[in-house]
Image (tube, grey):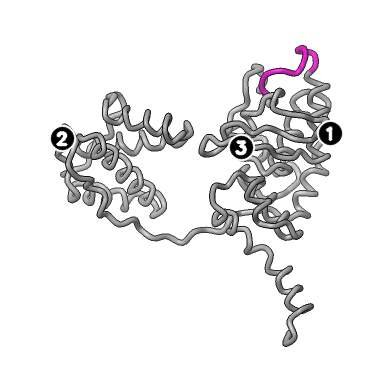
């Protein structure tokens, strides 16, 4: 069967029901819902007018074989997960007797280590930021301090409202992070100072309320804008560009390398599993070697 273009206009009731299940019961994020919807639309385009109840495991294997020639293994693995979830949902609802994706293996791929920025480079970045002269320069400085100082995802940072912050107590309430989980994170002194400056320069619009980080239309900043702000700041001080998530990785890496325990870092980052946090242990090799040399009798 030749692969057809994905149907971007049709609203499939079974897909809609599955996405609603993910949103309500699994508390999936908007980004996850959008990605799952795109995968299922792509499959629908491949199948043409076929009913979901008629789809076989061989159909799915042919679809995945085509995807494997277009995207990386990591993306194919995500597609397999989407198919398993969708057809499993259909089986539980009595739409079909089996889950044709249940026996399809997921491709293996090497998990890449988190990309992080050296402490000296981040020190250079923050030292190079110009003294805030208006709301926008203050916003950029405060945003970068919060991303690195709190280890927030870009989506979590832009979702912050002033009511979520307690500058006096030095903490932030992160609402509906990944997995729709809330958590409190500490605000470091540098982040608090930057936020106070932002609040003062943005005071012309009245008392602090609504989004902390706004665009020039006074609306909430979006995630893409966060990437542009970081890239601009990195270029200005001659550093290699990274995405905002690298600041989150750097926060965890530097904490671990300075002796923080994994459980504390797990709570800060909002990881559901400690195994996710353990990816950062690769940067502690120097500290491990120092401890080995100091304490091991045969060092």
Query: Is 208 part of what is drawn in magenta?
Result: yes
Q: Is 230 drawn above or below residue 175 in the view shown? A: below
Q: What residue did someone put label 3 on?
A: 154
**Residue 281 position in % (x across, y down):** 63, 62
**Residue 114 position in % (x across, y down):** 59, 55
Q: What residue did someone put label 2 on?
A: 50
Cβ atoms at labels 3 and 1 below 8 Å apart: no
Label 3 or label 1, whichever comes before in sequence order: 3
Cβ atoms at labels 2 and 1 below 8 Å apart: no
Residue at 63%, 19% (x, y): give it.
219
In space, the residues marked 3 and 2 are separated at their CA atoms by 40 Å
Residue 205 located left or right of residue 37: right
How crowded is the residue under tag 2: few (<14 C-alpha within 10 Å), some, or many (20+)?
A: few
The disc placed on residue 267 is: none
Residue at 27%, 50% (x, y): give it.
64
Label 3 or label 2, whichever comes before in sequence order: 2
**Element marked by disc 1:** helix
Q: In front here: 144 or 280?
A: 280
Q: Is 126 drawn above or below residue 10 in the view shown? A: below
Label 2 or label 1, whichever comes before in sequence order: 2
Name the image quarter holding residue 195. top right
**Residue 59 position in % (x across, y down):** 19, 47
The disc placed on residue 193 is: 1
In space, the residues marked 3 and 1 are separated at their CA atoms by 20 Å
Cβ atoms at labels 3 and 2 below 8 Å apart: no
* Prevalent SS, magenta region: loop
**Element marked by disc 2:** loop
Quarter of the image containing the N terminus?
Answer: top left
**Element marked by disc 3:** helix
Bounds of the magenta span? 203-212
């Amino acid at each position: 069967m030749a692969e057809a273009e994905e149907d971007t206009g049709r609203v499939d009731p079974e897909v809609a029901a599955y996405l609603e299940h993910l949103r309500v019961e699994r508390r999936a994020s908007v980004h996850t819902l959008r990605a799952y919807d795109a995968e299922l639309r792509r499959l629908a385009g491949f199948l043409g007018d076929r009913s979901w109840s008629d789809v076989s495991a061989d159909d799915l294997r042919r679809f995945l074989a085509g995807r494997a020639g277009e995207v990386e293994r990591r993306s194919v693995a995500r597609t397999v997960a989407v198919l398993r979830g969708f057809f499993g949902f259909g089986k539980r609802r009595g739409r079909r007797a089996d889950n044709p994706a249940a026996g399809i293996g997921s491709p293996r791929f090497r998990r890449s280590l988190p990309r992080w920025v050296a402490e000296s480079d981040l020190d250079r970045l923050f030292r190079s930021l110009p003294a805030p002269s208006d709301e926008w320069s203050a916003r950029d400085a405060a945003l970068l301090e919060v991303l690195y100082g709190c280890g927030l995802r870009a989506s979590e940072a832009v979702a912050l409202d002033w009511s979520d912050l307690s500058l006096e107590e030095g903490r932030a309430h992160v609402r509906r992070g990944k997995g729709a989980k809330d958590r409190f994170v500490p605000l470091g002194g540098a982040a608090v100072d930057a936020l106070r400056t932002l609040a003062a320069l943005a005071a012309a619009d009245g008392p602090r309320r609504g989004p902390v980080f706004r665009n020039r239309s006074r609306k909430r900043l979006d995630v893409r804008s966060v990437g542009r702000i970081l890239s601009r700041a990195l270029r200005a001080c001659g550093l290699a560009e990274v995405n905002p998530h690298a600041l989150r990785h750097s926060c965890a890496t530097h904490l671990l390398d300075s002796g923080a325990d994994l459980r504390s870092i797990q709570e800060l980052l909002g990881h559901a599993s400690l195994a996710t946090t353990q990816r950062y242990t690769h940067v502690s090799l120097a500290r491990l070697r120092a401890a080995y040399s100091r304490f091991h009798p045969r060092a």
